[in-house]
Image: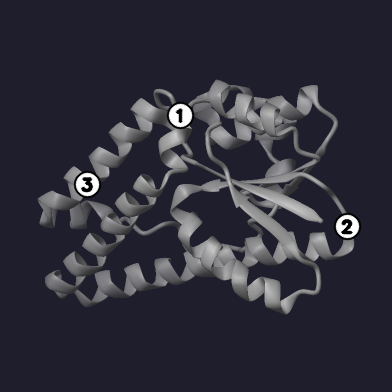
Amino acid sequence: MNNITLICTMHVNIGNCNSEELYAIIEKENPEIIFEETDIWRKKDEYYIKGLYKKQRSCTLETATIMRYLENNDIIHIPVDTYELPIAPPDIYTDISNACEDYEITVKNNFILSYQNGFSYINSDECSIELDKILEIEVKTIERLGKQKLMEKYKLWRSITDKRDNEMLKNIYDYSQKHKYTNAVFIVGAEHKKSILKKIVDFDQRYKTKINWKSWRIT
């Protein structure tokens, strides 16, 4: 049976959400394979070639941690976010924050809890609820503002995020259909968790290979 543990994270090194904690989680899981939310072309850029991943400010928390782990462990590393982004992330969140005080408060609260409690919070149901609140406020605020261009940009970006989730799962299932393994981890931003867990049901039906998924919890 192919087993994958979903480990959610943030892309920045803050408080108890840090490289040492993530490294310890990976080490305890002892995976044969690490699937990562990053694109395959990253392996060809300066993060890898020049070793800049060792500087936390130069790349994401996950990449820095995973590359350090690979220096000490002979395992398979598979970037799975191969969806080509047609645009840079739209700068729409400042407009939402300026228009809705609750949005800024909710985002800050999620950040503080992540800072204080690290991965135990980021992988919790509480975090999922907070992220749902943030998403709900975004949608309602944009609808209330009634700015057509802002709404179009937001819908486009949400669509791109949805397609990325499909792409990541497709790459994982394609690999799993051709290879057998016992223990893998998929490290991905917490904002993708709800969508991915929902889409797994459909991917299980489409692929012949069954994957046993579980969400990481502190033990």
- Compared with 143, 53 (above or below) is above
- Asked if residue 91 shows in the view, the reply is yes
Amino acid type at image mark 3: Thr
- Compared with 207, 96 (above or below) is above
What secondary structure is marked by label 3? helix
Task: Tell me the CA gap for discs 3 and 1.
Answer: 18 Å
Quick one: 30 or 170, which is closer to the camera? 30
Looking at the image, is mark 2 or mark 1 earlier in the sequence? 1
Q: Residue at x 33, y 53 (%)?
A: 129
Percent coordinates x, y for residue 162 in the rendering: 50, 68
Q: In this rendering, would 154 be left or right of 209?
A: left
Mark on residue 106? Answer: 3
Mark on residue 17? Answer: 1
Task: Tell me the CA gap for discs 3 and 2.
Answer: 42 Å
Percent coordinates x, y for residue 26 in the rendering: 66, 32
Task: Tell me the CA gap for discs 2 and 1.
Answer: 32 Å
Residue under pointer 2 = 179
- Asked if residue 59 shows in the view, the reply is no
Amino acid type at image mark 2: His
Quick one: 198 or 189, which is closer to the camera? 198
